Amino acid sequence: MNTNLLARAARGLIWGVMTLFLANIFLMIAAVTTSSIARRWLGTFLPDGYTFQWYLDAWKEFQLGAVLWVTAEVVVAVVGLSLLIGVPAAYALARRDFIGKRWLMLLFLLPLMVPPITYGIPLATVFYKLHLGGTIYGVILSNMVPALPFVILVMTPFIEQIDPNLESAARVFGASTRKMFWHVLTPLLAPGILAAALLVLVRTIAMFELTFLTAGPDSQTLVVALYYAVFAAGVRAPQSIDAMAMVYMVITLIWLLIALQFVNPTQLVSRVKEQPQGA
């Protein structure tokens, strides 16, 4: 009897905490959304009126057009380079066993497990010495540090789930490595490549620390520009800042929802391989 009561109390506590957390998130988003379209909101439960003028003001004041263009350039470059390098690297890891493979996989995990600020500061120091700091090239390279291992770790299970006999059959019929990879593996890996690309896209849009440390005035992405809009010197209307925050949130949320349509969590878990005796 006491066990049942404790179990019910624990479930009730968990549901209560989850409900409180979700309610806080919902109310916070609702407050920012309302503020971004409020004509005036001082000391009242609801604003005096509503307008979308703050979005136009934010677009002009914070130069959102240029910021969004830089963000798009960084995202496309990071996603493209990460896939170009990461997919072949994942194939090599999935199809080859070699000494130190587990340590190499652990090395790929480090940029994803360690807070970016811990390696972002020395990385930015090196970039500034190489005259890459403050440029869009530095922003792209710094964002690739976590993006490339992420692509490798996502794609490796997808490749492991493909029967190697298909590759052997293609080679029997005279296909070269390039043709086999392009005509046999790529169509089968398309869902995984798309999932990895979309997830890297969302991570790059949301990556603040590495971008902040390596970006300059002309290479800021949306999340860094939002930070400067909030904390930079000068007086700014809070409604225009909230409008900018809404633009960032909507863009990130849309791409995240698109990514979730193509991500199968069961494919992100590597199959457990049987180790041969004596290995």
Image (cartoon, grey):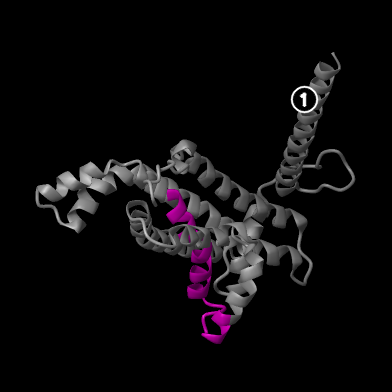
Q: Which residue is mark 1?
A: 11
Which residue, as the protein is rendered here, is positioned at the far top? 1
Looking at the figure, which quarter contains the N terminus?
top right
Give the image location of residue 120, x and y in percent.
61, 70
Residue 79 figure quarter: bottom left
Viewer-closest of 18 and 228: 18
Check if residue 149 falls in the magenta segment. Answer: yes
Lateral position of residue 238 relative to residue 271, left or right: right
Lateral position of residue 104 relative to residue 177, left or right: right
Which residue, as the protein is rendered here, is positioned at the far right? 43
Give the residue type at disc 1. Arg
Give the residue displayed 66% in from the left and 68% down from the top. 118
Lateral position of residue 274 relative to residue 54, left or right: left
Q: Main secondary structure of the magenta part?
A: helix
Give the image location of residue 70, x and y in percent.
51, 66
Give the residue displayed 36% in from the left and 51% down from the top. 94
How many residues crowd mark 1 within 10 Å: few (<14), some (14–19), many (20+)? few
Q: Secondary structure at mark 1?
A: helix
Give the image location of residue 206, x and y in percent.
59, 56
Which residue, as the protein is rendered here, is positioned at the far front? 278
Please say if 22 is above or below 179.
Answer: above
Lateral position of residue 187 relative to residue 41, left or right: left
Give the residue displayed 31% in from the left and 42% down from the top. 162
Please say if 205 is above or below 44.
Answer: below
- Which stretch is magenta? 126-154
